[in-house]
Amino acid sequence: MRIRHLSETVINQIAAGEVIERPASVVKELVENALDAGATRIEIATAGGGLTLLRVTDNGSGMDAEDLALAVERHCTSKLGEDIHDIRSLGFRGEALPSIGSVGKLTIRSRTADADSGHEITVEGGRVSSVRPVAANRGTMVEVRDLFYATPARLKFMKGERAEAGAITELVRRIAIAFPQVRFTLSGTDRSTLDLPACDTIEERIAQILGREFVDNALRIDANREGAALTGLASIPSYTRANALAQYLYVNGRPVRDRALAGAIRGAYADVLPRDRHAVTALFLDVEPMFVDVNVHPAKADVRFRDPGLIRGLFVGSIRQALSGAGIRPSTSAASAMVDAFRPGGSGNSYANTSPGGGNGYNWRPQPSPGFNPQTSFHRPMEFAEAAQAAFAEAMRPSADARAATVEPAPELKAMPLGAARAQIHENYIIAQTEDSLIIVDQHAAHERLVYEALKGALASRPMPAQMLLLPEIVDLPEEDADRLASHADMLRKFGLGLERFGPGAVAVRETPAMLGEVDVQQLIRDLADEIAEHDTVETLTERLNAIAATMACHGSVRSGRRLRPEEMNALLRQMEATPGSATCNHGRPTYVELKLADIERLFGRR
């Protein structure tokens, strides 16, 4: 078969296969165009999950007849000059509108601010009409009907109407966070109306999208490093989700789903969250356009950085710094969930949704009512009253064990964040009292975190002890991996790992960290080479050392079942207050729960 030119319609349909994956992709392109046009109000209407109808209306700058004709031609755009590296708009490829018109029925109606009337153009299955004058409001209205009617095979891959409508809702919410000054309205026959009024700050918009509870349980991030700035909110360790869908990331105002950035967030929370829980974030990275490539994929959801190690370090360092500076801070949702759990019919599942322990929520259930017992029932006969009163008085008299387990607090201790220790119950839980709340502390989990942080501090403050190998271990590697390891040799030596080049494609390992004991040197070196190649860091070695420290902390901490003296309990509380991250243990479980006095009163119907 001879080589030939493809028709313009086929070219557009090929482009549509990359740009227009589903109705949400159309909404993304049209909303980005509206934002680039300076719109302050964007209305989106859908039907049939977006497959039957998609309409996006904005009050932006609009287009005249000449621009409207060019807008549906491939690679025609007003957003890009001659420098492909200087991209300061959301759209720039000039492919979206012709791609949409090649697979659906597209109508564009637009009017500029200084024009007396608007103009309209239609594209149906790749066939473009002439531009004609119409009555129109200022701005642009883009309507897409019967999406993918020209490529019916693509329709077979669409999900149900509800799933497609949900994807559109999530996309609008994700874009809206980055543009608080714009009002977004999403409506249609296939959904309830979503109205996001314009806000003064991004934090207000985040509260609209993710809820005020997230803002109340989040840390403020504001960091700069070598021209890159990271701002936004990241949740405290005790406020988590079961998946990473609540992690919102933006690069220069563009919502992205980047595996490297997601990995950086996971690394920042590595030793404060369990493996099956995820932080909630709304983070905004601002870098010069020349240092980031947004032209990786036509959908523009992926990005590449010129210095990925710098960006990863910025994310990990700024989040960890915020965590360490936050002091001790429980989730505000834990108390409400605890109250709900103790009510008849309540369940700990709501607590598990926000607590880092996942399945360790409160699973209290009301017990079945026992049969009538005349000696214990509230409705017992009168002849049992005198005996019952005597039994009650005896029960209320504290035993020797109870008197030993309770502590009369010093008044000044109640003003401390974790208050004053009052009692120890079940030889594992410390009951403390503040001025307005009750604190329950898991003594083993709390002390485990304290010991772990002390060990990490010791590791960071001085070089790690190393053990000399009797014979150097030679590890064969690709030459580029050997170069990377050699360039990080000084850093690795601080962790107790001594290596040097051994020919063009190998390294000789002479020392290993003493903490690791017997270690598979070959696997360790290859893991480090992969880590450096991907992220330009030595996090693999750090994580291994931290894992050893976590194990040592677990076995070296106060065990469950040990009785503590009052001064020991108060000393533990004071250490927790002074230790970053002490609200969770090394495994991500909560170390304490705070129950406000108002919540306790609600339990007893006082409020």
Image (cartoon, rainbow, N blue to C red):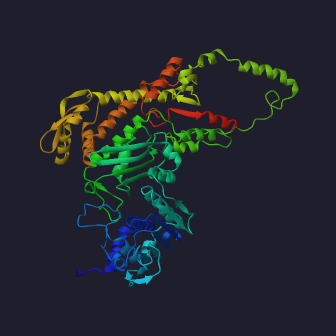
Classify the position of the N terminus by image quarter. bottom left
Picture quadrant where residue 17 is located: bottom left
Q: What residue lies at 46% left-to-right and 49% top-to-bottom?
A: 203
Q: Is residue 76 visible?
A: yes
Picture quadrant where residue 94 is located: bottom left
| Position of residue 82 in the picture relative to residue 429 (left or right) | left
342 or 76, nearer to the observer = 76
| Position of residue 494 in the picture relative to residue 159 (left or right) | left
The location of residue 550, given as percent across then percent down, is 39, 31
Residue at the far left: name it: 503
Classify the position of the C terminus by image quarter. top right
The location of residue 345, given as percent across then percent down, is 67, 43
**Location of residue 392 with respect to 205 vertically, above or below:** above
Q: What residue lies at 39% left-to-right and 84% top-to-bottom?
A: 129
The location of residue 592, given as percent across then percent down, is 52, 32
Q: What residue lies at 36% left-to-right and 42% top-to-bottom?
A: 267
Q: Is residue 104 visible?
A: no
- How many dots with numbers? 0
Residue at the far top: name it: 400
371 or 157, nearer to the observer = 157
| Position of residue 151 in the picture relative to residue 436 (left or right) | left
**Location of residue 588 with respect to 35 vertically, above or below:** above
**Location of residue 264 with respect to 5 vertically, above or below:** above
The location of residue 367, given as percent across then percent down, is 69, 37
